[in-house]
Image: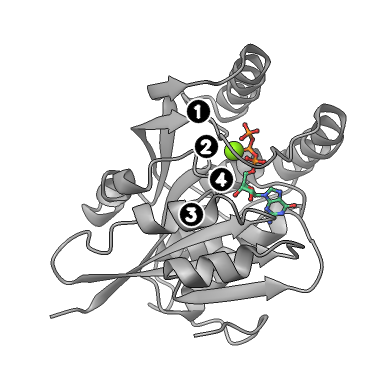
């Protein structure tokens, strides 16, 4: 009997060449009693991303009329997963760099009750094709998070992450441009338990990376600063909250 739901969501911007391959790699079974649904957040793509996603079997597509940014798309992915009744959410990039067939491993610590938030870790796993300057950038930004959180993190910029329902309800992404660091800082400062799971990563062969050095620095560094300066409510204080909160509003979800 199916009674629990995993929603796999993909933030996507102009990924018509890759998104179909990612969706076809997503396992539709993770554990007995669990169903899997695929949700795409199409962030104002000007190519045929939505059509390619639908053709590959996406169950739900949220389309933004205009490009809002990866942070905004992940925020909407979390909210739409809650609206769809997800017990667990799993985000994965739509660029086919991350191993969708390893989704069961990445959600396992949440399923087993050991963690509320998981990150697929490339640096604990296998990396193919990442350029040196990207490696250095990843190491530096991960190190910054280690210092700010005073704990070990291997890969702070992963594009494959799992969330318990409570983590999805409580996550607050402070800017629209990106989510990678601020989301981890936000959840861990609230007291959510994070676990990293080794994954294999293969740099994209098609389409374009959105990262532009100056724009990334100019947006991400001030957001990290802002996130660290705002107060957060520790998790212990809200553990007794009502069991399920269904968000009512938001862009239309096609079913
Ligand atoms: N919502 C949204 N998603 C985007 C945007 N630009 C890129 N993406 C998506 O974000 C994911 C990661 O994008 P990439 O450009 O590969 O960036 P990255 O993986 O952080 O960096 P690389 O190391 O270059 O791969 C992919 O699924 C993209 O489709 C955007 O403007 N809005
Ligand atoms: Mg990528």
Q: Earlier in the sequence, mark 2 or mark 3?
A: 3
The reply to whether the residue tagged 4 has its Cβ within 8 angstroms of ligand 1 is yes
- Are the residues tagged 4 and 1 within 8 Å (C-beta)? no
Residue 59 appearing in the image: yes
Q: Earlier in the sequence, mark 2 or mark 4?
A: 4
* Residue with the mark numbered 4: 95
Mark 1 lies on a secondary structure that is loop
Mark 2 lies on a secondary structure that is loop
10 Å neighbourhood of mark 1: few (<14), some, or many (≥20)? Answer: many
* Residue with the mark numbered 2: 158
Q: Position of residue 77 (x, y in %)?
A: 57, 65
- Are the residues tagged 1 and 2 within 8 Å (C-beta)? yes
Find the distance from the CA under tag 2 to the CA under tag 4.
13 Å
Q: Is residue 25 above or below residue 133?
A: below
Q: Residue at x 70, y 39 (%)?
A: 208
* Residue with the mark numbered 1: 155
Q: Position of residue 7 (x, y in %)?
A: 40, 67
* Residue with the mark numbered 3: 91
Q: Quadrant of residue 31?
A: bottom left
Mark 4 lies on a secondary structure that is loop
């Amino acid at each position: 009997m199916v009674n629990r739901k995993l929603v796999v969501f993909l933030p996507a911007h102009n990924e018509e060449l890759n998104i179909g391959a990612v969706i076809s790699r997503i396992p539709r079974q993770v554990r007995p009693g669990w169903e899997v649904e695929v949700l795409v957040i199409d962030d104002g793509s000007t190519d045929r991303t939505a059509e390619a996603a639908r053709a590959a079997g996406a169950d739900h597509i949220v389309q933004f009329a205009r490009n809002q940014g990866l942070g905004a798309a992940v925020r909407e992915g979390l909210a739409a997963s809650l609206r769809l009744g997800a017990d667990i959410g799993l985000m994965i990039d739509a660029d086919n760099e991350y191993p969708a067939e390893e989704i069961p491993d990445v959600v396992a610590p949440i399923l087993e009750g050991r963690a509320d938030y998981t990150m697929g870790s490339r640096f604990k796993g296998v990396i193919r094709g990442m350029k040196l300057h990207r490696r250095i950038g990843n190491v530096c930004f991960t190190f910054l998070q280690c210092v700010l959180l005073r704990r070990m993190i291997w890969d702070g910029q992963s594009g494959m992450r799992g969330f318990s329902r409570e983590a999805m309800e409580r996550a607050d992404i402070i800017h629209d441009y990106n989510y990678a660091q601020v989301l981890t800082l936000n959840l861990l400062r609230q007291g959510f338990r994070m676990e990293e799971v080794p994954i294999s990563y293969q740099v994209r062969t098609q389409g374009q990376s959105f990262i532009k050095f100056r724009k990334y620095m100019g947006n991400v560094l001030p957001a990290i600063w802002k996130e660290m300066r705002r107060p957060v409510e520790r998790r212990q204080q809200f553990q007794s909250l009502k069991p399920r909160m269904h968000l009512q509003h938001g862009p239309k979800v096609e079913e």
